[in-house]
Amino acid sequence: MASFRVAFTGSHSRSVTFAHIARNLVKQGVEVCFIMPGAKHRIRYLTDMGFDRGRILDISDVDKSYDPEALALLESHSSVTASYMLMSDRLLCKKGDKAYGYLGGVFKSVSKFISDNRIDIVFSEATWAYELAVCAACSHAGAEFIVPHSIRIPNGRFGFFSGIFQDRLVRINKPKQVLPLPAKFRAEHAPAQPELISKRHFISFFRHMNRFIRRTAKDETEQNVFGLVRERVVREFNLRLSGFSSMAGIPSADYVYMPLHIAPEASLDVLGGFRQNQLELVRSVARSLPHGTLLAVREHPAGLGRRHHGFFRETAKLPNVVNVSPYADGSELISRACAVVSVSGSAAYEAAFAGVGSIVFSDMFFDELPTVFRCRSLEDICEVLKQASNVQPDKHALAEFLADITANSYEGCVDSAEIFPKAIEKENARMVSQAFMDIIEYYSSSERPLYAASMSSRWS
């Protein structure tokens, strides 16, 4: 393999996971850079691990002056607009016109950094606006933008996706084996949200307050101290007034199941995009149901308190909607449903293994399954629901799909080290790093040249 250079973006404790992966890649001869949103303690964590400070870009220092030419160039290299990026970011969307200057500055700075360092692949999340701008910068500078993400089913595995959406799974043509389907599948879910105020939260809060006072918290992906306090208080208030304890269990009548996304969340804000307003989506789906069929709406168990308590009063007013308890068994709700509706969630994927038709409103890697229907217009919901409700399960197609996904995914955890501590355990880091090497070797052995390594800098 020729000399190959990769970069990782970093935000919150996901940067810790990436750092452990990167350290193993360096041992195998890969040159590594980092693109960091600005938190000084995370940059210090990288340098303490031995990474060269000269190969770490701190984008909090970029020129934030408004540059319409840079934004136009960004949009010409992106599948979404600059406004889409900002409105998908739970924090940057509150910064007004100054946010456009920041986004243009990130695009220019990262494009130059990629070219100057001859980076071939950027491994990243696709959650924050700056990461979406990094994707555009990769396109402009000639690098690949790859997102490692859990594939949900089978459990404990992850794949690599090209671009900011989860529709293009990188397939490296590994041999696949079609096996009989297990009797039952259950999608992998994040652990349920713990108590809203805990020892861990206090420690995290005081550390953040210390950084805020010392003015080292210049990261556009981190709340300020006042925002954190307000969020915790509001979540506790919403949790007490939402009435979850009095919500029904599994309905006895026919129903379409609609589990809600955590809000805010990348699977809704980025992947969902134009379907961010879940209350309006509930109304649209309910409006499309035939008489005698209910819409069962369920809060995400890991998102309790994040949504305004008035949401569930509004859904309860609709004549054919029932709010079901977030503590009800999600798998049973899926298996008994006429159909499942989700913006981009794993419930639609899990429904295929239960023989239940489902609808998604985003292009997803699993929507090629014959039981998963992509709805592109709210006006089409009625017709698409009919198709999903009358679908005939195809076990052969399901087994073929599962074999393909398994062959092109990897065992291990690439998620936040704070939520999933095993992500930085030695054996997991070793196993995951080998998966990254597979992707690197796949691109390095392709007939096309190493992208950024063959290009000169495009920014003076």
Image: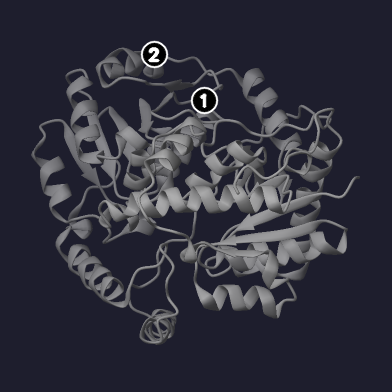
Q: Residues within 10 Å of mark 2 (few under 14, many from 20)?
A: some
Any mark on residue 367, and which?
1
Colour option used: one colour
| Residue toward you, 260 or 163 | 163
Residue 262 appears in view? no
Query: Where is residue 442 drawn, in percent x and y?
Result: 81, 37
Please, which residue is most extreme toward the right here? Answer: 1
| Residue toward you, 418 or 69 | 69
SS for dot 1: loop
* Comparing labels 2 and 1, the label whose residue is closer to the camera: 1
- Three-letter amino acid code at the position of disc 2: Gln
- Compared to 22, does 47 lie above or below? below
First along the sequence among labels 2 and 1: 1
Residue 433 appears in view? yes
**Which residue was labeled with disc 2?**
387
Query: Where is residue 222 drawn, in percent x and y?
Result: 40, 67
What residue is rendered at 25% in x and 53% in y? Answer: 96
Query: Where is residue 418 drawn, in percent x and y?
Result: 54, 70
Quadrant assignment, res 302? bottom left
- Distance from label 2 to label 1 (Cα)? 14 Å
What residue is rendered at 39% in x and 35% in y? Answer: 81
In this rendering, position of residue 308 left or right of residue 434: left
In this rendering, position of residue 88 left or right of residue 229: right
SS for dot 2: helix
What residue is rendered at 45% in x and 26% in y? Answer: 356
- Compared to 157, does 444 lie above or below? above
| Residue toward you, 231 or 451 | 451
- Compared to 435, does 401 lie above or below? above
What residue is rendered at 69% in x and 23% in y? Answer: 400
Quadrant assignment, res 87? top left
In this rendering, position of residue 149 left or right of residue 315: right
- State yes or no: discs 2 and 1 in contact (Cβ < 8 Å): no
